[in-house]
């Protein structure tokens, strides 16, 4: 009998137990005698039985209890789905809601539930989605606080194909009083122990998403953003990895947040080593006034379970994000090879210069020309022009439409850079609307890169920018937009809002950004968007819902990119990482790396060039031509195949290695990068992953079985420089070396 894959939500009415499951995972909880949701289990798939025995109630001194004359039932001792503070649990809650009398005590208890096929859409916010009802099941639990008449809906979706559960929360004010939501976690998960390593992706501008790891300890460990964007400093993601798990085996839980603003992800380990994992909007700087009849919805948290180590977790994220978060026609289409003029010209360009770069680009096979910063307003440097989305006539006297036409007649698609959320004081927009800036009245505003942030929480601001952008998009028939965002938010306040709404400004801002994206995508479904925030300052799942690719980092040095792209691959698919070959000496590090290695790194991304091809030698141009040919041939496999990390630049100072395997396992592309050349190097074999052990693969004319390549490994030794003589001529190895191998199945 064939076993059909299915997502299920079981409800055992008698035990009041909910059990979400598919063939890989189970997530189980139940309603307590007084209506609280008690968590029972999350992990590998289990049969549908009664798991109430997993609730342990022990008497422990110096604690507090729910009912008089009872010394057992305390929420402090129980794992929960929607914890509250102040009624026997002392850990951080899911919700904090201030009532008109100032009290923050609530008592949300089970009211009803509903199980639906598919996945309801989140209003005005990005989220994962399904295309057929059979792809998932959603459980919606309604809790109610009887005193305030406020209801909470917990939405749990389990996918059929993926070991994934998503959760979001809605708060509905059905009472007559105003409520202030001070905190609302999208996800709160109590795990029975703390035997995990916590992994985060952290860094800085040009050093994004480096992998940091430490073991969980009693107390709170957290990452957050307070910058109004998800930030370069911390990505909205963590993994909890079992101590004995590694890249390819063992248990890992990954949590990610589909949101592009301030977030908090924390793990609180209590005195009994229970771990409470929470994901949500950062309560710092947040509060939301909820009038009677209003609803507040949290963004979505995504929970991934893997019993195949970190790489297994990553592959689930990649497939989910690539196919059920990214939308529109670019989800399926091959991404164009692009050339961007930023590092080629910065602000120093005119039409002739751009056209000469475009012509050279067409000759080597580039498909899309992107004109970066500087084409608009009085934008001759980074002090002026932001906000004025009309052509800079001094620089492009014939207009943007004419340039676009020219580029298209050369044979390339045309794209433009915008920074829609920003304004310079030296701009027409600021002169007309000084009030559109985010600022605090009677206090000085603080700049970043000489620019200020428009209040995207205000509808007319977003509408205005939309109109301006539409004019340019129509005039130049854009194929692509790079949407940049180059500073965090400060002085956050909005005089249009009440005193008790000031904590809404950050979130309203993010909703405004999402609204503009939505308006543009609805009107221009063919445009490919690439998001950017000084490189990777807003590389998050929220952005991926609108822009299928993100400029990964302003650091375009191939060696630096190894860490950045390796870390980013923890959850973001290769197709989402903008990766360009740039000039040497590199503009960020001054490093000189071979053009081959620059290409070999950038291939594992949404590939392009960021240099003036006119400055390359004939030999280099020939290499570029080959690179583009290679990428066009294999981009579909690279973007849609399974990605395997083989050697980590975070644990190996001198080497990085990764590979992709096509879905049918017939093609694999393996890359190995060596940073410094070594003398008399040790023997090296690379154990490949994800091949079909029964298949025979051809590599450089030799045949190997999948089994031997995975178990014995592929021999990649190079003796490197040593004694040079006739039998041992100078080996062609050098610093910043790299190699790529193509494995193709040999049909028998
Ligand atoms: C940011 C981006 C760069 C470039 C510049 C232009 O730094 O990350 O790629 O677009 O802005 O000002």
Image (tube, grey):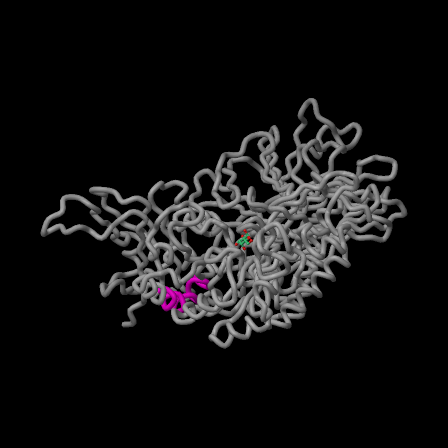
Q: Say whether residue 563 is visible.
A: yes
Quarter of the image for residue 134 reads bottom right
Based on the picture, tell me whether residue 71 belongs to the magenta stretch. Answer: no
Rendered location of residue 421, percent (x, y): 66, 54
Q: Which residue is outermost to the left?
A: 726
Q: Which residue is outermost to the right?
A: 176
Rendered location of residue 33, percent (x, y): 75, 41
Identity of the residue drawn at 44% across and 66% down: 357
Quarter of the image for residue 442 reads top right
Rendered location of residue 277, percent (x, y): 61, 41
**Placement of 552 over or under 285, stated as above or below:** below
588 displayed left or right of 175 = left
Rendered location of residue 106, percent (x, y): 80, 39
Quarter of the image for residue 180 reads top right
Q: Nearer the viewer, residue 439 or 88?
A: 439
Q: Say whether residue 12 is visible.
A: no
Based on the picture, tell me whether residue 631 belongs to the magenta stretch. Answer: yes
508 displayed left or right of 402 = right
- Residue range (magenta): 627-641
Q: Nearer the viewer, residue 94 or 78?
A: 94
Quadrant location of the C terminus?
bottom left
**Placement of 584 over or under 33, stated as above or below:** below
**Placement of 548 over or under 199, stated as above or below:** below
434 displayed left or right of 208 = right
Q: Nearer the viewer, residue 118 or 461?
A: 461
Q: How many marks?
A: 0
* Prevailing secondary structure of the magenta residues: helix
Q: Which residue is outermost to the top?
A: 62
């Amino acid at each position: 009998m064939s076993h059909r894959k299915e997502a299920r939500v079981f409800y055992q009415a008698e035990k009041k137990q909910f059990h979400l499951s598919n063939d890989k995972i189970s997530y189980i909880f139940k309603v307590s005698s007084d209506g609280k949701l008690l968590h029972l289990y999350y992990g590998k798939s289990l049969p549908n039985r009664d798991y109430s025995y997993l609730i342990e109630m022990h008497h422990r001194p110096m604690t507090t209890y729910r009912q008089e004359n009872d010394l057992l039932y305390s929420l402090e001792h129980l794992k929960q789905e929607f914890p509250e503070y102040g009624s026997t649990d002392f850990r951080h809650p899911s919700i904090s809601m201030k009532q008109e009398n100032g009290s923050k005590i609530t008592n949300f208890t089970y009211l009803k539930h509903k199980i639906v096929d598919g996945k309801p859409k989140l209003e005005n916010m990005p989220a994962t989605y399904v295309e057929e009802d059979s792809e998932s099941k959603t459980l919606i639990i309604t809790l109610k606080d009887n005193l305030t008449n406020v209801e909470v809906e917990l939405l749990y979706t389990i996918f059929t194909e993926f070991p994934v559960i998503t959760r979001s929360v809605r708060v509905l004010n059905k009472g007559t009083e105003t409520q202030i939501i001070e905190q609302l976690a999208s996800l709160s998960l109590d795990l029975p122990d703390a035997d995990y390593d916590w992994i985060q992706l952290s860094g800085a501008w040009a050093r994004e998403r480096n992998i940091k790891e430490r073991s969980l300890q009693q107390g709170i460990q957290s990452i957050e953003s307070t910058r109004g964007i998800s930030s370069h400093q911390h990505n909205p993601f963590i993994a909890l990895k079992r101590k004995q798990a590694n890249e390819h085996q063992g248990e890992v839980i990954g949590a990610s947040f589909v949101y592009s603003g301030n977030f908090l992800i924390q793990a609180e380990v209590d005195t009994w080593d229970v771990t409470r994992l929470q994901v949500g909007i950062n309560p710092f700087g947040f509060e939301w006034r909820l009038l009677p009849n209003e609803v507040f919805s949290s963004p979505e948290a995504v929970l991934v379970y893997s019993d195949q180590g970190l790489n297994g977790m990553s592959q689930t994220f990649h497939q989910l994000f690539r196919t059920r978060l990214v939308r529109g026609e670019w989800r399926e289409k091959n991404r164009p090879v692009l050339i961007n003029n930023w590092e080629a010209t910065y602000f120093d360009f005119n039409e002739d210069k751009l056209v000469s770069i475009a012509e050279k680009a067409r000759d080597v096979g580039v498909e899309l020309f992107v004109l970066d910063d500087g084409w608009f307003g009085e934008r001759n440097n980074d002090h002026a022009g932001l906000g004025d989305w009309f052509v800079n006539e001094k620089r492009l006297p014939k207009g943007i439409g004419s340039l676009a036409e020219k580029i298209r007649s050369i044979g390339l698609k045309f794209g433009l850079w915008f920074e829609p959320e920003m304004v310079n004081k030296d701009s027409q927009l600021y002169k007309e609307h000084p009030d559109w800036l985010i600022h605090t009245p009677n206090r000085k505003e603080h700049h970043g890169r000489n620019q200020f942030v428009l209040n995207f929480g205000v509808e007319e601001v977003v509408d205005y920018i939309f109109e301006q952008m539409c004019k340019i998009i129509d005039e130049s028939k854009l194929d692509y937009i790079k949407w940049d965002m180059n500073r965090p938010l400060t002085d956050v306040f909005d005089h249009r809002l009440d005193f008790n709404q000031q904590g809404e400004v950050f979130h309203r801002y993010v909703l405004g950004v999402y609204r503009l994206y939505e308006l543009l995508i609805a009107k221009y479904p063919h445009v490919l968007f690439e998001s950017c925030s000084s490189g990777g300052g807003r590389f998050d799942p929220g952005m991926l819902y609108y822009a299928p690719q993100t400029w990964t980092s302003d650091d375009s040095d191939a060696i630096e990119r190894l860490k950045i792209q390796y870390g980013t691959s923890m959850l973001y698919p290769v197709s989402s990482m903008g990766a360009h070959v740039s000039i040497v000496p590199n503009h960020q590090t001054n490093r000189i790396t071979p053009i081959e290695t620059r290409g070999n790194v950038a291939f594992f991304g949404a590939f392009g060039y960021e240099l003036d091809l006119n400055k390359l030698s004939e030999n280099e141009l020939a290499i570029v031509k080959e690179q583009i040919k290679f990428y066009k041939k294999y981009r579909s496999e690279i973007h849609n195949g399974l990605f395997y990390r083989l050697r980590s630049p975070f644990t190996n100072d001198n080497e990085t290695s990764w590979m992709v395997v096509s879905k049918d396992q017939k093609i694999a592309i393996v890359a190995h990068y060596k940073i410094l050349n070594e003398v008399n190097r040790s023997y090296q074999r690379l154990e490949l992953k994800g091949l079909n052990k029964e298949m025979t693969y051809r590599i450089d004319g030799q045949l190997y079985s999948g089994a031997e390549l995975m178990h014995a490994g592929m021999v990649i030794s190079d003796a490197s420089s040593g004694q040079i003589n006739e039998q041992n001529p100078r080996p062609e190895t050098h610093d910043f070396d790299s190699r790529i191998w193509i494995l193709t199945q040999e049909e028998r």
